[in-house]
Amino acid sequence: MVAVVARRSRLLLIRRSDQVSAPGKFCFPGGAIEEGETEEEAVVRELREELGVRVQPVRRVWESCTEWGVHLSWWQSRLADDAPIVPNAAEVSHIGWYTIPEILGLSDLLSSNRQFLQKVLAGDIQLDLEP
Ligand SMILES: Nc1nc2c([nH]c(=O)n2[C@H]2C[C@H](O)[C@@H](COP(=O)(O)OP(=O)(O)OP(=O)(O)O)O2)c(=O)[nH]1
């Protein structure tokens, strides 16, 4: 489950900690769905665990599969309130709000995220950048 959170043409990006898979890579917040959960519930739980924030999943905008076989469901989501983002250091080493060109300029970006953003720029994925 991947949460795509936009604000004033910027997207919420995380840098993965050294203790998880794909250490040090940039991607969006998210994680695996657990048994019995809906996709929306998984998005809400993952963002709470990872960043200490409440989000509302709005719309599934894309589905994909990583080169290593993980199915990803991409959910445009919005922050439910103005509470501060408090990254869980075990999972996330850094967070920030970046424009799409800035994100595409990062060499440590996960390849599925690069593919996602290229599709957004091409108009193949509809994303609301000013929700
Ligand atoms: N969270 C997240 N994972 C992503 C993104 N793009 C992408 O390819 N992935 C991959 C990396 C991982 O193989 C998988 C989800 O990893 P995760 O670390 O967030 O979830 P997890 O704790 O349940 O999984 P894991 O570390 O045990 O592999 O999806 C993204 O934007 N966000």
Image (cartoon, rainbow, N blue to C red):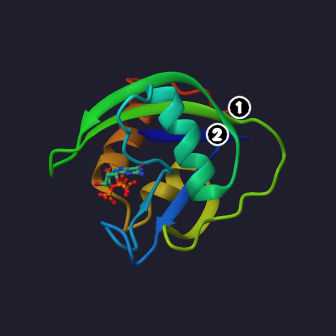
- The picture places residue 86, in percent across and down from the top left corner, at 70, 63
Quarter residue 93 falls in: bottom right
Give the class, few, some or many, for how many residues have Cα within 10 Å of label 1's Cα (few <14, many ≥20): few
The amino acid type found where label 2 is placed reads Ala
Per the model, the C-alpha gap separating discs 1 and 2 is 7 Å
Which residue corresponds to the image point at 42% horizontal and 33% vertical from the top-left?
Answer: 74
Q: Quadrant of residue 44?
A: top right
Q: Contact, CB < 8 Å: mark 1 with mark 2?
A: yes
Query: Image quadrant for the N terminus?
Result: top left
Q: Residue at x 71, y 28 (%)?
A: 131
Sequence-wise, which precedes: disc 1 or disc 2?
2
In the image, residue 123 sits, relative to residue 84, either above or below, namely above
Disc 2 C-beta below 8 A from ligand 1: no
Q: Identify the disc placed on residue 72.
A: none
List the residue tagged with mark 2. 6
Q: Relative to 12, is 62 above or below?
A: above
Query: Looking at the picture, does residue 1 appear above or below residue 92?
Result: above
Residue bearing the label numbered 1: 130
Q: Alpha-carbon neighbours of circle 2 within 10 Å: few (<14), some, or many (≥20)?
A: many
Say left or right for 112 vs 102. Answer: left
Q: Position of residue 128 (x, y in %)?
A: 61, 27
Q: Is residue 116 left or right of residue 127?
A: left
